[in-house]
Amino acid sequence: MHTHFRAGLRFGPQVAARVPDTWVDQPYTRFEVRPKSPTIGAEILDIDLAEAGRNADLFGWVHELLMHHKLLVFRDQALAPADHVAFAERFGPLEGHPIQPSHPDHPTLLLIHRQA
C-alpha cells in the first residue's frame, strides 16, 4: 500500500493562526495595546471609546484588534449613554432586552447596577 501526500501540506501539530495571512503588524500610535496572554485578550489603554464611536478610522483599529485578540479590555471609560450606544452600533444593529431594564432614553442600553 502506497501513501500519497499532496505537495504543500504540513503534518503534525500546527499553531493556529488568529489572524489572516494578510495581517500587517503595525505599532499603534493613538493608544497602547497590552496582550494579556499568548492566545486571547488584550488591554487597550489611552483610548476614548466615545471618540471611537464617532471616528471610523479609530473604530477600524478597535475592530481589527478585536478580531486579532478576541477579547478586549477598556478600563476607566466614562461614556455618556448616547456615546455608549453609538460605539456599540458600530458593530451592528442593537436589540433591547425583553425583561431587563434599559435606559429611559436609549432602550437598547441595558442598565447594570453594581452593589457595594
Image (cartoon, grey):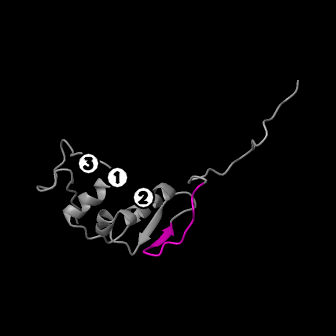
Q: Quadrant of the C terminus?
A: bottom left
The amino acid pointed to by label 1 is Phe
Is residue 52 depicted above or below 103 in this figure? below
Choose top left, top right, bottom left or bottom right for residue 61.
bottom left
- Please name the residue shown 30% across and 56% down the image: 88
Check disc 3: other Cα within 10 Å, few if <14, some if 14-19, many if 20+.
Answer: few
Choose top left, top right, bottom left or bottom right for residue 9.
top right
- Please name the residue shown 20% across and 50% down the image: 108
Magenta stretch holds residue 67? no
The amino acid pointed to by label 2 is His
Secondary structure category for the residue under label 3? loop
| Residue ID for mark 1 | 91
Q: Percent position (x, y) of residue 112?
A: 22, 57
Magenta stretch holds residue 33? yes
Q: Earlier in the sequence, mark 2 or mark 3?
A: 2
Name the residue furthest top.
Answer: 1
Secondary structure category for the residue under label 1? loop
Circles 2 and 1: CB atoms closer than 8 Å:
yes
Q: Which secondary structure class fits the magenta region best?
A: loop
Secondary structure category for the residue under label 2? helix
Give how far apart the Cα atoms at labels 2 and 1 are.
8 Å
Q: Percent position (x, y) of residue 95?
A: 24, 45
Numbered mark located on residue 53 in the image = none
| Residue ID for mark 2 | 63
Instruction: Report the magenta residues as a range.
Output: 22-35
Q: Earlier in the sequence, mark 2 or mark 1?
A: 2
| Residue ID for mark 3 | 94
- Please name the residue shown 20% across and 62% down the image: 81
- Please name the residue shown 38% across and 66% down the image: 58
Give how far apart the Cα atoms at labels 2 and 3 are.
17 Å
